[in-house]
Image (tube, rainbow, N blue to C red):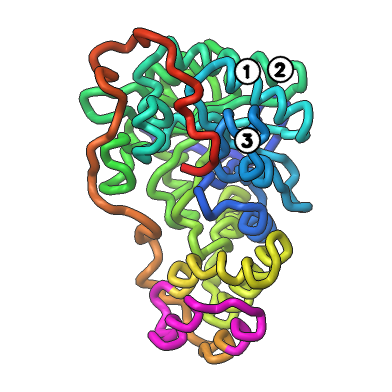
Amino acid sequence: MSTSLSPPRSLRLGDLEVATPVVLAPMAGVTNAAFRQLCAEQGAGLYVCEMITSRGIVEGDRTSLSMLTFAPNEQFRSVQLYGIDPDTIGRAVEILCADHGVDHVDLNFGCPVPKVTRKGGGAALPWKDVLLGQILTAAVSAAAPYGVPVTMKTRKGIDDDHLTYLDAGRIAQDTGCAAIALHGRTAVQHYSGHADWAAIAELKASVDIPVLGNGDIWEASDAIRMVEQTGVDGVVVGRGCLGRPWLFRDLAAAFAGETVTELPRLGEVAAIMRRHVELLAGVMGEERGCIEFRKHIAWYLKGFAAGSEVRHQLGMVSSFAALDELLGRLDPTEAYPVGELGTPRGRQGTPKRVVVPDGWLDSRLVDQPLDPLAEDATSGG
């Protein structure tokens, strides 16, 4: 494919226009309101909250509803839903639009986690193409009176022998989805190996609705390269921003035709870490916010000298005072570790067997309706 394409300057999803064609991927335990606000402070884009189960919304599950918290700088309220039952998903979308003022709904058909796929959900569901169409139809119909666009995210398929992405693209288009995002890996791959950008290009060439590419975007230059190689209308960024929310600043600049060459020194990274904790504390209180932040320490300090003792103590921090004392021990002049640029972040692992319901792969038809009560009402994937 030609590499002479000009990067898109914005992304249109129905009536929504996102200033920069970049979407923050939902990540369980990470993309809460505090992290989304932090990313939004760095640059433009669409920031999707953690995955919420449709059953949790319909049943009024306290944990699910508590996740419907949005930061003041989020221009659009974006929610990702997971579910396996068309009626339940339709009802959940109606509730999100009518009662919570949601501006965008994304449906998750890409999660490879066993607790999701063993019930026929996530990355396993597109194999049942009729059911996929029923779910998308229900969601789009429920959102239409509110002018809320519905999108879907998927993977290439369950494995190389059970690919579904081209069928999913056709179904998404036929049912009225505003866009489809493709993670260029199969469910078997989980997060291992390399994303197949050629598959993303193939999907883009086969549908008329916008296509978003996901997988192996570690730097802003990767996003531009993906657009040039595949022709996608925008990109979805997940693990690449872990401990690096300024990636959205770089992405905004890159899509505006500018180049960002400055890398943050450790002092600047420490300031962003402190801001992250402040935002978490604003949502859940100082102690809980500090504890929640602990999981981010290794990502922020990846490649820096820092020191094992400081890292260890940061991993036990539970107050602003303790955090400030420890951050004060870091060398603010230490240069960013350039060896970390362009390398994978977060979980990678190895290929894993995908757990699906008995007989799931025998036919693309659903022999009997899936039991919506089999869907866990609690959220996260």
Magenta stretch bounds: 302-325
Secondary structure under the numbered disc 3 in the rendered image? strand
Does residue 370 sit above or below 245 in this rendering? above
Asked whether residue 74 is in view, the answer is yes
* Residue 10 found in image quarter: top right
Label 3 or label 1, whichever comes before in sequence order: 3
> Who's the residue at 45% across and 29% down the image?
109
**Residue 29, percent across and down?**
52, 53
Residue at the image position 70 percent from the left and 35 percent from the top: 17
Q: Relative to 187, is 180 above or below?
A: above
Q: Is residue 3 above or below residue 137?
A: below
Image coordinates of residue 88 in percent, x first then y, are: 58, 20
Q: Is residue 33 above or below residue 369?
A: below
Q: Point out the frontmost of discs 3 and 1.
A: 1
Which residue position holds label 3? 11
Disc 2 crowd rating (10 Å Cα; few below 14, some 14-19, many 20+) is: some
Labels 2 & 1 near each other (Cβ < 8 A): yes
- The amino acid marked with disc number 2 is Ala
Q: Is residue 85 left or right of residue 13?
A: left
**Disc 2 secondary structure class:** helix
The x, y position of residue 15, in whole percent, is 73, 26
Which of the numbered marks, if any, corresponds to residue 144?
A: 2
Image spot of residue 262 (x, y percent) = 55, 71
Taking the magenta stretch, the answer to whether it contains residue 318 is: yes
Q: CA–CA distance between discs 2 and 1?
A: 6 Å
Q: Earlier in the sequence, mark 3 or mark 2?
A: 3
**Residue 10 can be seen, yes or no:** no
- Residue that badge 1 annotates: 140
Label of residue 360 in the image? none
Residue name at image x 54 percent, y 16 percent: 86
Q: SS for tag 1? A: helix
